[in-house]
């Protein structure tokens, strides 16, 4: 991290709040500053979120001297779980801006320090050299949810073990060829906690995902392919446009998982679902570009699922007429009036 | 929960007392129906306080509310229904009914059944009240009050559970239906309320407790639970089970549990217990592709009975699975069936995949060209994306094809077409980095180094230097331009950006660059670093198996010893070379490269016969081994005039396979000269000279 001494060390959510107020200058909205649970306020307050993401997206952010990156770094390292959630909330914007800018090889020491801290946390959580694996069930073995006829004394059938995420090697710096892996692992960490994340954070990710894929979604309607800006156009003033980035499987996979959560997870927001459907489609087009089979399979399934309607819970059926209708009618007024 | 029920308990009596006064209030709904007559008010009051009606009245207070609420619910007046239901005191009602039910049901089952004729099931008090609570919960859910809904629904299930502690008896149909519905509603209500932990528990309770659910209902719950697990990213905890059968599969992560459930749903469908639902297969496809288990997925798809998928659709998906698993031939066979003109010959995705598979193999290249051309012909004009991909693959297939055609004319024709397709593809999608890379390789192979260099730089720019093969392409192009020191700079930059374990192919290029610059000691140093790296890779792959396999451009130990042997023999360190060759041979018994190196050693020591034998062995092990063909040609050309035709034959053959082989041109020139064909000789020599200035340290084909 940058060498200038931090204004004050962050030990608790309160410290973090105070430090953030200094960094953002204008101070925090009163509701946040006076909140009983500052970490939760940081996580969920829309004003704070938009102020921070605006800073993260702003030109010149992510340099080694960026005080906001320093804050994210310190806040995450304070080892307060609730505060860590509040930092993770900004991962979509952080990773999104970082990946788009890293391609142009700007110095982004601030972003990288935060990402490496998150990566180290993910690696420590997982354990050295441990891959995240999944044992595939074999229906020949019984399970809590089904019975299987197992001949007595037969050995249980062998299980396939699939690797969902390979082991996380330690990284002290971000080397270009490992960048996707590091950011991918950070996104995996975000994905683990995504159920706690506010809507706007997920919306941010879907937005960047569309930019990363750099392909055109049919949902946007126009015939003209919406290509990412050429490098010179991006440099030429105005709002920075987010550009396509290399999407190897190690970055593609966590992106797909996050998009899948936004699309099919328990969140009821239609706005998010729509944005996620767009992101899924863009990822699918991107996958067809290289025709990498598993990327095509995974993203195509999401696109198809986004077009299917979930089977509704059947409405209760009311068979049979009520016999005591007259009696009931007589009682109706009484009952209805009593509750007023 | 408990508190909620207490509330209900307090409401009912309080309500019953001031009934008379409240009833007189002319509230809108009451006014619409009719003014409340007093006797009935009394009646209701009596019904509320007593459990049964001795005076021949068939409805008590709770039942009346239950029925009335149901009527309102049926009419869609959810809020009115809710108001009516609010007055029901579940706890009290249950307590009233419980003894009668539990008395009757387990012991005198037969009589109970006969006592409850099917015509009056809805008047069974317990089921009526429970249904009312269920409907109340559903109404709350519809009004968005999910937490309350969940609590109400849970109280239904708790009551049922406590009523039937001794297992599920043959409960009457109406009650069973209410149980089913409540079991299904509860997890959804928790989910909507955002209480994911409760939802998880509720789902498991639904599936693991003996509710006697019907198959369809159970399947619906399983499907929703699987989706919840797969996409919810909740804090997962394993199911708590009293006992487990030995060898039983107990899921350890949410993904495992989701896959298990989806597989069970699929199996239930096979057994005819449920209807077909395409979303199950899509969820399963998603989950198994995440895990990188395409073969398991293929098996699931193959098990689906005919008639649900269009067969071409199934073949195409299977091809994707097999292709992901690396079984290219199987995948291609499926695609051939699917793309048959009687089936679905213009399916873009299948065509693209087929072209992609074909573009990797020389002998399939012609077939691939056909597929790719069909893509470009049939991709809608608006779909420039697919068209671009099609053109890209067309270019790759044409490039591959150009390598195996026999005539120069055809080759140059194909090469021109290759570049044309790639250029056209780039004009449609100039951000596809793979495309830029392939374009660079194609230019390089056609020895258009300036254009190749441009592409290589553009590729590195676009990927931010994050792809190792881009750096290698750059270094090879620079080496072909004899700019060795710049090539080394590129390799060093790449080494900087690469983690230790992935540096293999870069170090190999570096060693070869050192050889090309005649710095043998540094080359040996580079090879030593490579050996150390391979050793490290071995160790790490022991600790975490199959993690490092398939890493882009990894180097085998064999290659290193082979490279070292070549280096030592070029320095005439015969003993060292022999040691290295032995090491190489131990790793790979029959290798053309080893035999060729052996031949070279014999030749250098003037053992012509042995050398020739080794070379012949080399190209019998690998029919297209160019260096040994060139070496044989060279050897024969020195053996006198009567061997010249044979020498010419070998050299021409070598040039057929690798038209840019400079040594072959050189010796062919010598053969022509010895035969007196001076013009031909001059042409060959000129070709050799031109190629010398564009020879990379390593073949460009090592890149892809």
Image (cartoon, rainbow, N blue to C red):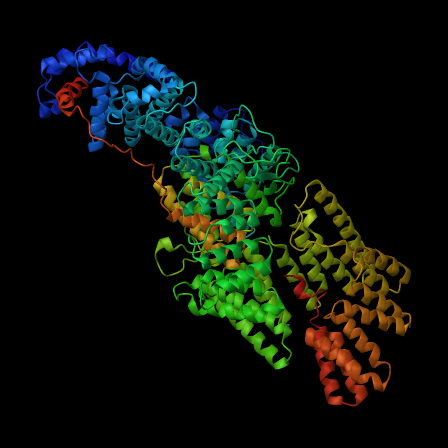
Quadrant assignment for the N terminus of chain B: top left
The reply to whether residue A253 is in sight is yes
Towards the viewer: A290 or A30: A290
Within the image, what quadrant is residue A216 found in? bottom left
Within the image, what quadrant is residue B272 found in? top left
Towards the viewer: B6 or A145: A145
Q: In the picture provided, is A241 more to the left or to the right than B545?
A: left
Count of all numbered marks drawn on residues in the image: 0
Residue at 52%, 42% in the rendered image: A62
Towards the viewer: B395 or B166: B166
Can you say whether B404 is above or below B82 in the image?
below
Q: In the picture provided, is B426 more to the left or to the right than B559?
A: left
Q: Position of residue B617 (x, y in %)?
A: 81, 69
Q: Position of residue B147 (x, y in %)?
A: 35, 26
Q: Position of residue A333 (x, y in %)?
A: 13, 21
Q: Where is residue B415 in the image (x, y as percent from the top left)?
A: 58, 74
Quadrant assignment for the C terminus of chain B: bottom right
Residue at 28%, 12% in the rendered image: B10
Can you say whether A65 is above or below B631 in the image?
above
The reply to whether residue B689 is in sight is no
Q: In the picture provided, is B460 more to the left or to the right than B348?
A: right
Q: In the picture provided, is B234 more to the left or to the right than B633?
A: left
Residue at 12%, 24% in the rendered image: B28
């Amino acid at each position: 991290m940058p060498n200038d001494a931090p204004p004050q060390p962050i030990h608790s959510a309160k410290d973090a709040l105070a430090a953030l107020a200094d960094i953002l200058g204008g101070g925090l909205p009163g509701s946040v500053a006076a909140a009983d649970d500052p970490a939760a306020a940081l996580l969920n307050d829309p004003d704070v979120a938009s102020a921070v993401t605006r800073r993260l997206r702003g030109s010149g952010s992510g340099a080694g001297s960026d005080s906001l990156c320093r804050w994210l770094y310190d806040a995450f390292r304070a080892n307060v779980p609730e505060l860590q959630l509040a930092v993770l909330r900004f991962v979509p914007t952080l990773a999104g801006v970082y990946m788009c800018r890293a391609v142009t090889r700007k110095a982004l020491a601030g972003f990288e320090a935060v990402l490496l801290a998150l990566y180290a946390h993910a690696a420590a959580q997982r354990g050295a050299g441990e891959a995240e694996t999944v044992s595939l069930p074999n229906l020949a073995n019984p399970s809590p949810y089904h019975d299987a006829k197992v001949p007595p004394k037969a050995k249980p059938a062998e299980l396939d073990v699939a690797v969902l995420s390979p082991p996380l090697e330690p990284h002290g710096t971000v080397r270009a060829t490992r960048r996707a892996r590091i950011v991918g692992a950070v996104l995996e960490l975000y994905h683990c906690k995504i159920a706690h994340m506010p809507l706007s954070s997920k919306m941010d990710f879907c937005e960047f995902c569309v930019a990363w894929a750099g392909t055109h979604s049919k949902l946007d309607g126009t015939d003209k392919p919406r290509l990412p800006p050429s490098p010179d156009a991006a440099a030429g003033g105005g709002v920075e446009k987010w550009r396509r980035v290399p999407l190897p499987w190690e970055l593609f996979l966590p992106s797909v998982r996050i998009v899948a959560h936004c699309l099919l997870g328990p969140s009821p927001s239609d706005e998010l679902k729509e944005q996620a459907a767009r992101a899924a489609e863009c990822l699918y087009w991107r996958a067809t570009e290289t025709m990498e089979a598993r990327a095509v399979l995974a993203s195509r399934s999401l696109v198809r699922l986004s077009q299917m309607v979930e089977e509704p819970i059947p409405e209760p059926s009311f068979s049979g007429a009520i016999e005591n209708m007259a009696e009931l009618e007589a009682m109706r007024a009484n009952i209805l009036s009593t509750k007023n | 929960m408990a508190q909620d029920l207490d509330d209900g308990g307090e409401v009912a009596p309080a309500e019953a007392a001031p009934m008379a006064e409240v009833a007189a209030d002319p509230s809108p709904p009451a006014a619409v129906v009719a003014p409340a007559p007093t006797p009935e008010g009394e009646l209701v009051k009596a019904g509320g306080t007593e459990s049964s009606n001795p005076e021949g009245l068939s409805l008590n207070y709770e039942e009346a509310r239950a029925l009335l609420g149901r009527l309102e619910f049926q009419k869609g007046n959810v809020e009115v229904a809710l108001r009516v239901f609010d007055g029901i005191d579940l706890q009290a009602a249950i307590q009233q009914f419980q003894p009668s039910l539990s008395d009757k049901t387990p012991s005198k089952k037969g009589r109970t059944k006969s006592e409850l004729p099917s015509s009056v099931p809805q008047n069974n008090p317990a089921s009526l009240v429970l249904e009312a609570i269920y409907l109340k919960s559903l109404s709350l859910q519809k009004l968005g009050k999910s937490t309350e809904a969940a609590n109400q629904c849970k109280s239904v299930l708790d009551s049922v559970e406590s009523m039937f502690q001794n297992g599920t008896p043959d409960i009457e149909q109406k009650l069973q239906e209410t149980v089913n519905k409540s079991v299904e509603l509860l997890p959804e209500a928790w989910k909507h309320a955002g209480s994911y932990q409760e939802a998880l528990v509720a789902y498991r309770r639904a599936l693991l407790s003996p509710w006697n659910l019907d198959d369809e209902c159970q399947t619906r719950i399983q499907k929703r639970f699987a989706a919840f697990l797969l996409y919810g990213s909740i804090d997962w905890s394993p199911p708590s089970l009293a006992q487990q059968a030995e060898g039983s599969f107990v899921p350890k992560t949410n993904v495992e549990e989701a896959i298990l459930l989806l597989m069970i749903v699929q199996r239930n469908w096979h057994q005819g217990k449920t209807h077909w639902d395409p979303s199950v297969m899509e969820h399963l496809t998603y989950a198994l592709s995440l895990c990188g288990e395409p073969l398991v997925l293929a098996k699931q798809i193959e098990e689906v009975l005919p008639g649900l998928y269009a067969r071409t659709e199934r073949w195409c998906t299977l091809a994707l699975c097999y292709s992901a698993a690396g079984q290219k031939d199987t995948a291609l066979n499926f695609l051939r069936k699917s793309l048959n003109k009687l089936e679905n010959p213009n399916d873009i995705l299948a065509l693209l995949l087929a072209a992609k598979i074909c573009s990797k193999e020389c002998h399939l290249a012609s077939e691939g060209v056909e597929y790719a051309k069909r893509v470009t012909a049939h991709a809608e004009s608006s779909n420039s994306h697919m068209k671009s991909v099609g053109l890209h693959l067309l270019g790759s297939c044409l490039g591959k094809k150009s390598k195996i055609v026999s005539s120069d004319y055809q080759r140059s024709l194909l090469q021109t077409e290759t570049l044309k397709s790639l250029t056209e593809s780039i004009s449609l999608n100039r951000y596809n980095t793979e495309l830029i890379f392939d374009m660079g390789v194609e230019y390089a192979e056609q020895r258009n180094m300036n254009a190749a260099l441009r592409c290589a730089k553009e590729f590195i720019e676009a990927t931010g230097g994050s792809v190792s093969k881009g750096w290698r392409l750059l270094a090879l192009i620079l080496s072909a331009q004899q700019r060795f020191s710049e090539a080394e700079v590129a390799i060093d930059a790449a080494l900087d950006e690469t983690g230790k374990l992935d540096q293999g192919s870069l170090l190999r290029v570096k060693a070869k660059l050192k050889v090309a610059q005649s710095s043998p000691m540094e080359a040996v140093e580079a090879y030593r670093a490579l050996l150390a790296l391979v050793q490290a890779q071995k160790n790490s792959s022991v600790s975490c198996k199959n993690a490092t396999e398939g890493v882009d451009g990894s180097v085998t130990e064999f290659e290193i010893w082979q490279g070292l042997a070549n280096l030592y023999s070029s320095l005439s360190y015969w003993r060292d070379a022999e040691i290295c060759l032995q090491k190489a041979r131990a790793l790979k018994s029959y290798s053309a490269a080893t035999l060729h190196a052996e031949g070279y050693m014999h030749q250098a020591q003037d053992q012509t016969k042995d050398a020739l034998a080794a070379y012949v062995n080399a190209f019998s092990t690998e029919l297209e081994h160019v260096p040994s063909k060139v070496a044989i040609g060279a050897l024969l050309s020195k053996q006198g005039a009567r061997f010249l035709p044979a020498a010419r034959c070998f050299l021409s053959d070598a040039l057929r396979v690798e038209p840019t082989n400079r040594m072959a041109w050189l010796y062919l020139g010598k053969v022509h000269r010895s035969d007196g064909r001076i013009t031909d000789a001059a042409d060959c020599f000129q070709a050799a000279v031109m190629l010398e200035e564009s020879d990379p340290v390593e073949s460009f084909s090592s890149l892809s």
